[in-house]
Amino acid sequence: MHDKTLCVMRPEVSHEGFASLAVPTYRASTIVFKDAKSYADRKYRGPDGYSYGLHGTPTSRTLEAALTELERGVRTVLVPSGQAAIALVMTTVLMPGASVLIADTAYPPATGFCENFLKPRGISYKVYDPMIGGGIAELMDPTVKLVWTESPGSTTMEVQDIPAIVAAAHAGGALVACDNTWATPLNFKPLDHGVDFSVEALTKYVGGHSDLLMGSVSVRELPQQRRLKDTMRMMGIGVSPDDCALVLRGLETMGVRLAHCAAVAIDFAQRLAELVPAHLVLHPALEHNPGHEFWKRDFSGASGVFSLIVPPAAEEALPDLLTAAKVFSIGASWGGTHSLLAPMNVTGDRSVTASVHPGTILRISIGLEDPRDLWTDLLPIARAIADSLHNETLHQAEAPSP
Ligand SMILES: *Cc1c(COP(=O)(O)O)cnc(C)c1O
């Protein structure tokens, strides 16, 4: 062979005796075939065979298989973000004329997808109260093909009665999807409760280091994976094996990361609930949290994200308090090693939940820093809230009665 050929063709090296604990990163666009017949027959390899890099490499298949086992499903597909996972399920299940029921507390871009993408294409949606439970039966009609759940709800943390919703949805002929990003399959297994599509933003706890974007959908029945893969093939959607390798690395430590974040978050939530009126603290593990009984019944644990309602009197002081925090960063995409604070206002995103707090809700994501340093940042915020309420009460007491 001439040099230029040697540059392109690689010598075979032995793998004999090499056993690594790391998952190799297999990159590929094209896949080569051992003979002309295998090439001609490649379409018969099906969605689980290898045909093109876009449709999977051993690296992505390893991640899919790991998630499938954790979710106790039959297959998992990987997409470039959590939002892509939401869009994939909805575009696959819903045809023009169909409709979807979506929880008022869903990740706001999920509802945004219904409004801005599905609606103009003749697919309607209806928003429901996350605490509706089996009452969702009353919203079912023959056009409803999908019920979208997210538990606990974004920012306001309502835990849904998933088994009751699944029973009513299936009775009405609809499939059910659950955005399980907060719990991860370590703390809740939607497919075990009859959910058809378990959706995860791997960007959050599974990746776990705020350095990648990926989403997954795990299914309970094989035909659903076939349908999802068909949509992905038509749209040309796939994920990078390098990102899959990072997610696989994140997955290895997820158990200890999550256990730590959950323990600190629950401890902080309880401490905060003693400093400010308890109902201002939103965490599924607190007894007053809406759906706490479903969390106790269905979940095996918690994660490190919870919220603190900021009363109107404390709103003015909040921006300076957030800026003063030394360890927490200000940011939205939680689930990494760095703790985050995100001031949220959910009123614009909600249409049917009656009692949602109209002002700022502070979403807190606990990371892996020393909890003592984190508490040093949170304490002044809790004190400012307590003081603002105390001053308000004084003012009310001083105000002359009309
Ligand atoms: C972050 C998030 C998503 C979206 O994930 P991306 O990878 O950022 O697109 C979806 N659902 C929930 C509950 C999330 O927190």
Image (cartoon, rainbow, N blue to C red):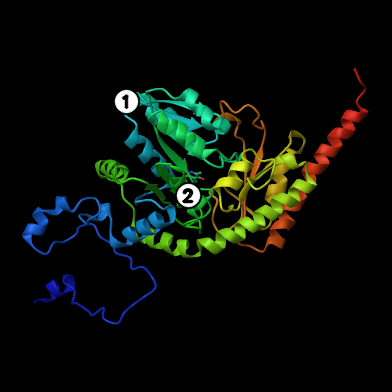
**In front here: 72 or 240?**
72
From mark 2 to mark 1, how far is it between C-alphas?
A: 31 Å
Locate residue 352, reporting x and y percent.
Answer: 57, 26
**In what element is the residue under mark 2?**
loop
Residue 367: tell me if it is visible: no
Quadrant of the snapshot with the C terminus: top right
Residue 379: tell me if it is visible: yes
Q: What residue would you read off at disc 1?
A: 96
- Quarter of the rendering containing residue 121: top left
Locate residue 328, reporting x and y percent.
Answer: 64, 55
Question: What residue do we see at 67% from left, 32% from top?
Answer: 357
Quadrant of the snapshot with the N terminus: bottom left
Left or right: 74 in relation to 281: left
- Quarter of the rendering containing residue 118: top left
Question: What residue do we see at 61% from left, 39% from top?
Answer: 291
**In what element is the residue under mark 1?**
loop
Q: What residue would you read off at disc 2?
A: 189
Number of numbered discs visible in the structure rendering: 2
**In front here: 154 or 151?**
151
Left or right: 227 in relation to 278: left
Locate residue 46, reporting x and y percent.
Answer: 20, 51
Q: Mark 2 or mark 1, which is nearer to you? A: 2
The CB of the residue at mark 2 lies under 8 Å from ligand 1: no
Which amino acid is tagged 1? Pro
Locate residue 251, reporting x and y percent.
Answer: 46, 61
Which amino acid is tagged 2? Lys
